[in-house]
Image (cartoon, helix red, strand yellow):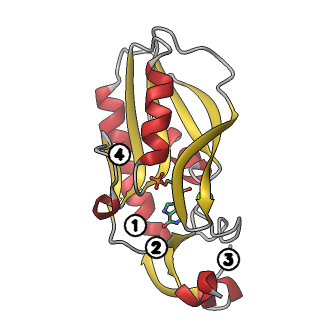
Amino acid sequence: MINATTSPMYKDLDKLLLCSGEIAKRVCALGREITRDYGGRDLVCVCILKGASLFFSDMIRSIDLPLSVDFMAISSYGSATKSSGVVRILKDLDKDIVGRDVLIIEDIIDTGLTLSFLMENLKARGAASLRVLTLLDKPSRRKVELAPDYRGFEIEDCFVVGYGLDYDERYRNLPDIGVLRPEVYSA
Ligand code: IMP
Ligand code: MG
């Protein structure tokens, strides 16, 4: 396991925001809530690659229901730390979602532009229901009105990495979530 005190990747962080233990506790609580809400329904959990991959794999193991999984990859154009809202589907769902109860699992909602595009796209496909679970939420940065149905943590306006979240494809493998030092992305 990567050690925060010896790993060089941690030197690029200003501070730790959420440690793996806190994340695991929240994942358990969300799992209980979702297990309660989706009993008897036809649940399909959709992982938004790549950022949500770690959160997704922990979440589905804390939902005590029969469910299926599917994956989508989208890219939103923009700089490495800001999205533009112009979104392209890189990998679509394998199966159709007609009549199914779809839970989108995202890593973070920032401006909300990426997710609002995705919701519009999925809404047209005839799901019985469509909800969003996000690990992190930065409501102060929202450019479109969009509230997740479930969320792990609300955070301030800062750029975070770890537990699946990246800067330029790095830091996804950190077990904790931390604030990236601005020098790293402004250099
Ligand atoms: P939005 O379209 O502005 O809501 O941005 C959503 C996407 O931008 C997320 O799925 C992330 O990939 C990325 N993103 C936004 N904020 C952060 C952050 O603080 N760290 C890492 N990625 C982020
Ligand atoms: Mg990213």
Front in this rendered view, residue 117 or 57: 117
Rendered residue at 57%/63% (across/down) = 163
Amino acid carrying mark 4 in the image: Leu
Rendered image: mark on residue 2: 3
Front in this rendered view, residue 88 or 100: 88
Give the class, few, some or many, for how many residues have Cα within 10 Å of label 1's Cα (few <14, many ≥20): few
Q: Marks 2 and 1: in contact by CB < 8 Å? A: yes
Rendered residue at 39%/25% (across/down) = 130
**Which quarter of the figure is the N terminus placed in?**
bottom right
Q: CA distance from mark 4 to mark 3?
A: 26 Å
**In which quadrant of the rendered view does residue 128 lie?**
top left
Q: Marks 3 and 2: in contact by CB < 8 Å? A: no
Sequence-wise, which precedes: disc 2 or disc 4? 2
Q: Position of residue 53 (x, y in %)?
A: 61, 49
| Side (left or right) of 38 relative to 72 | left
Q: Marks 3 and 1: in contact by CB < 8 Å? A: no
Amino acid carrying mark 3 in the image: Ile
| Disc 1 secondary structure class | helix
Q: Is mark 2 within 8 Å of ligand 1?
A: no
Q: Label 1 belongs to which residue? A: 22
Q: Label 2 belongs to which residue? A: 19
| Disc 2 secondary structure class | loop
Give the class, few, some or many, for how many residues have Cα within 10 Å of label 3's Cα (few <14, many ≥20): few
Q: CA distance from mark 1 to mark 2?
A: 5 Å
Q: CA distance from mark 2 to mark 4?
A: 17 Å
Q: Is mark 3 within 8 Å of ligand 1?
A: no
Give the class, few, some or many, for how many residues have Cα within 10 Å of label 2's Cα (few <14, many ≥20): some
Front in this rendered view, residue 154 or 87: 87
Amino acid carrying mark 1 in the image: Glu
Rendered image: mark on residue 30: 4
Sequence-wise, which precedes: disc 2 or disc 3? 3
| Side (left or right) of 138 relative to 70 | left
